[in-house]
Amino acid sequence: MDFEDRLNALATKVRNQAAAIGTEEATKNAFIMPFISTILGYDVFDPLEVVPEFTADVGIKKGEKVDYAIMRDGEVQILIECKASTGVPKIEHASQLFRYFSTTNARIAALTNGVIWQFYTDLDAPNRMDAKPFLVLDLLDIDETLIPEVQKMSKDSFDLDSIISAAEELKYVGVIKREIAGQFREPSDEWIKFFTTRVYDGAFTKNVREQFTSLVTKASRQFLTESVNDRLKTALGAGVTVAPTETPDVTSEPVAEDDLNRDTEIETTLEELEGYQIVKAIACGEIKPQRVTQRDAKSYFAVLLDDNNRKPIARLHFNSRQKYLGLLDENKTETRYPLASLDEIYQHAEAIREAVVRYR
């Protein structure tokens, strides 16, 4: 397996087991040690590479410990502080990291609950750990643009200079992306005023703000919807024969709006929406389009008939590098077919129609 495949395999394990992990020690054994060994490539049983319960005297705090220290050539390179997977890692949990960061040679520190990994360095002041991470890796929602940066911290590819040089851009790009996502979900007064003053010549009064709050929110959602639909038009460009009186409804607005309000642990991707619309277009040869619905989950994206999970039309397994189309037979036994591109879904049109006919 290459680096990305190993990361996705661990992410699958986290999705499947997170609900059963209740303590910090269980989190270490199930998620954190496998990340150190499988993803970063360090031998967790070799004290020359990984030191558990790393101790150093720091001022008046004698004998305080950091959960793991990753060593290279006898020097501490990465400090890791762990919390149980049931809680969200917060900066107030990192007091040991702050103290140890200034007394060791470490330039990288990680705070993690095994699911979310927050990586820190010293961009703001030398030898003093920043208050904000430069990289946040969520194994339940992996940002593919971060994978090469995480790989730089692995044993085989460790490149401290490259990590530090990219850290500032990563730090601010990540924060900006999260801020933009938050504004699309719930626009702030500043966001509303920003757009209002560019399209409205009058004074920005209380009444104007109230009026434009709904307008900016609506415009933001329509912008996302149109972006998704542009991708859908491309995906549906190959065409599919449907009943002449039943034109498939390819609008993604309900799906896109639902995704904006969805729990952030489950992120519906553009590719999943495109795949859903392809399956829906095929199914519309047999039934009305409004009967085809979708439900996203952590492990797969389900396309259902009548919003009934007992009537699965198809499953889209798009959470790893290799994407699969899952089709179920009359006994609900699933067969997964690898997809090199979304257009290959059309090759399974007959099986998709058979599934619809079986339930209708």
Image (cartoon, rainbow, N blue to C red):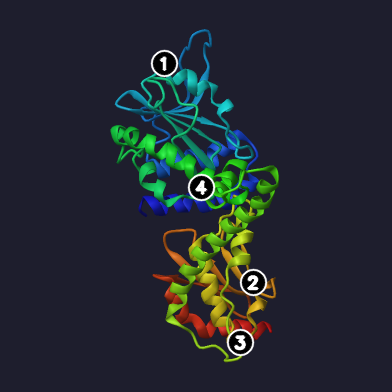
Marks 4 and 1, how far apart at CA:
30 Å
Q: Residue furthest bottom?
A: 244
- Please state which amino acid type lies under the numbered disc 2: Thr
> Residue 36 appears in which quarter of the rendering?
top left
Marks 3 and 2, how far apart at CA:
16 Å
- Which quarter of the rendered picture does the N terminus lie within? bottom left
Residue 139 shows which numbered tag?
4
Marks 3 and 1, how far apart at CA:
70 Å
Give coordinates of residue 333: x percent, y percent.
59, 74
Ranked by sequence position, the earlier of labels 4 and 1 is 1
Q: Residue at x 63, y 37 (%)?
A: 87
Q: Which residue is mark 1?
A: 103
Marks 4 and 2, how far apart at CA:
27 Å
- Please state which amino acid type lies under the numbered disc 3: Glu
**Which element carries disc 2, helix, strand or loop?**
strand
Residue 293 shows which numbered tag?
2
Ranked by sequence position, the earlier of labels 3 and 2 is 3
**Which element carries disc 1, helix, strand or loop?**
loop
Give coordinates of residue 200: x percent, y percent.
57, 51
Q: Which residue is mark 3?
A: 246
Q: Note whether residue 222 is visible.
A: yes
Q: Residues within 10 Å of mark 3 (few under 14, many from 20)?
A: few
Q: Residues within 10 Å of mark 2 (few under 14, many from 20)?
A: many
Ranked by sequence position, the earlier of labels 3 and 4 is 4
Given residues 226 and 70, the one toward you in this image is 226
